[in-house]
Image (tube, rainbow, N blue to C red):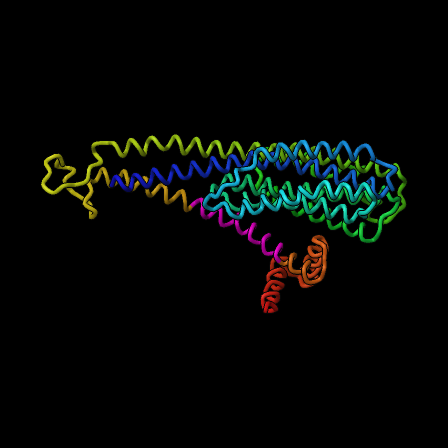
Amino acid sequence: MSRALEYLHASRASEIASLRRLMRTGEQILAISELIHVLQRERGASNIWICSAGRLFGDELDARAREVEQRQKIALTVLPEAVAQPGYSRFCMLIAAALQSLESLPSLRQHIREGQYSHAEAMEGFNHIIRTLLNLVFEATDTASEPAISRALIALFSFMQGKELAGQERATGSAGFAAGQFTPEQRQRIQMLIAAQEQSFATFSQFADAQNQQQWLLMANADSQIERLRRIACTGAQCGENGVLQWFTLLSQRLDQMKQIEDGLCSTLMACCQRAITTSEQAEPQHLATNQDASFSLYVAGASWLGEQEATLDSNGLAPQLGRSVLSLIREQAQRLQAQADELATMRASLDERKIIDQAKGWLMQQHGFSEQDAWQALRKSAMNQNKRMLDIAQAILAVAATLKP
């Protein structure tokens, strides 16, 4: 029976090790969050500079680039070592992709400065970099096993995704206001970005803790000035050059407020990890004491140390006290794991749906030359026209794609 207790001990020790690794991942997510925030600012400033033909935000570009470089150095210091670890292959691959995209930043900035990129090309360059960084957060969300931690991670990732869409809205609106008018494509894109934000923040609200939900409710609805500028952008009304400064300032303030909630979600994640570690560590001495208790001896036929009441053995040949104590530990562990599995199944269903939709978007982008947003819009429109879920449409597309493979 000592072997069973050894494995229970190993189970708990493994759980603690996983939680500590996840806690380190939380620190990495916080650094990535800071880097994404300043990249979003640089993207918006670059769009204003391009669409104003260099009249606006020239000095801002240099300041934002320096800010990104500082945050990038900090983010690099918290990345895990590039050494082989079990179950770490995909995460390392995503880190490599993120680092490779960050290496393209100097070239992207040079093309912007030399007037070689349109605002759409500059947007896509920044969007790609930010997307590779968000993939790291999503990977952590997909691998957590503790329900409370999974909920915190899903809330954090959903909020970060919604904030990124808000950042894209700021950049797209900045381009239109700086140019003095909005193209039909820009108007449609802003409408789509607003709708996509609502979807991301609805997922966030489903999984977030009460405190962060309450903080979001206080700022969820955009103020009247932002709504007025949104109407100008979406209706194609004429807008003066002052509109771009007002738009960028208001949306930047909103994104900064979102960043405070994002920081709160990171703190919630770290607190969940710490509580889970503390709970596991406090439970461990009980297991060890159980292993050392003299009453936990295996039955030996004819041994005189069994009292009269303890002489009845169970079918496994164990003293009743031993059987009750050890089996109760195992039963409690099994019940806890089952409860976790049930809750995780619900949360993973949301993540699996997102993966399927992302795969369908990728296929549409590859086959039809769509941008990511165009592919999402095509899925959404098809779902509305057929009165089906986007998941159903995505699954149908992937089924067709599978039949077309050689």
Asked if one can make out residue 162 in the rendered structure from this viewpoint, the answer is no
Q: Is 353 a magenta residue?
A: yes
Tell me: 133 left or right of 90.
right
Q: Position of residue 300 (x, y in %)?
A: 14, 41
Q: Position of residue 257 (x, y in %)?
A: 69, 33
Asked if one can make out residue 296 in the rendered structure from this viewpoint, the answer is yes
Q: Position of residue 394 (x, y in %)?
A: 62, 60
Residue at the (39%, 30%) spot, across then down: 282
Quarter of the image for residue 134 reads top right
In the displayed structure, would residue 338 be above or below residue 403? above
In the displayed structure, would residue 356 be above or below residue 275? below
Q: Which residues are magenta?
A: 339-359
The C terminus lies in quadrant: bottom right
Quarter of the image for residue 215 reads top right
Q: Main secondary structure of the magenta part?
A: helix
The N terminus lies in quadrant: top left
Quarter of the image for residue 361 reads bottom right
Depth check, front residue: 187 or 385:
187
Tell me: 202 left or right of 10.
right
Depth check, front residue: 83 or 94:
83
Tell me: 148 left or right of 321.
right
Residue at the (59%, 39%) spot, across then down: 156
Instruction: State how many labels appear.
Output: 0
Q: Is 293 a magenta residue?
A: no
Q: Position of residue 322 (x, y in %)?
A: 23, 38
Residue at the (45%, 39%) spot, across then down: 18
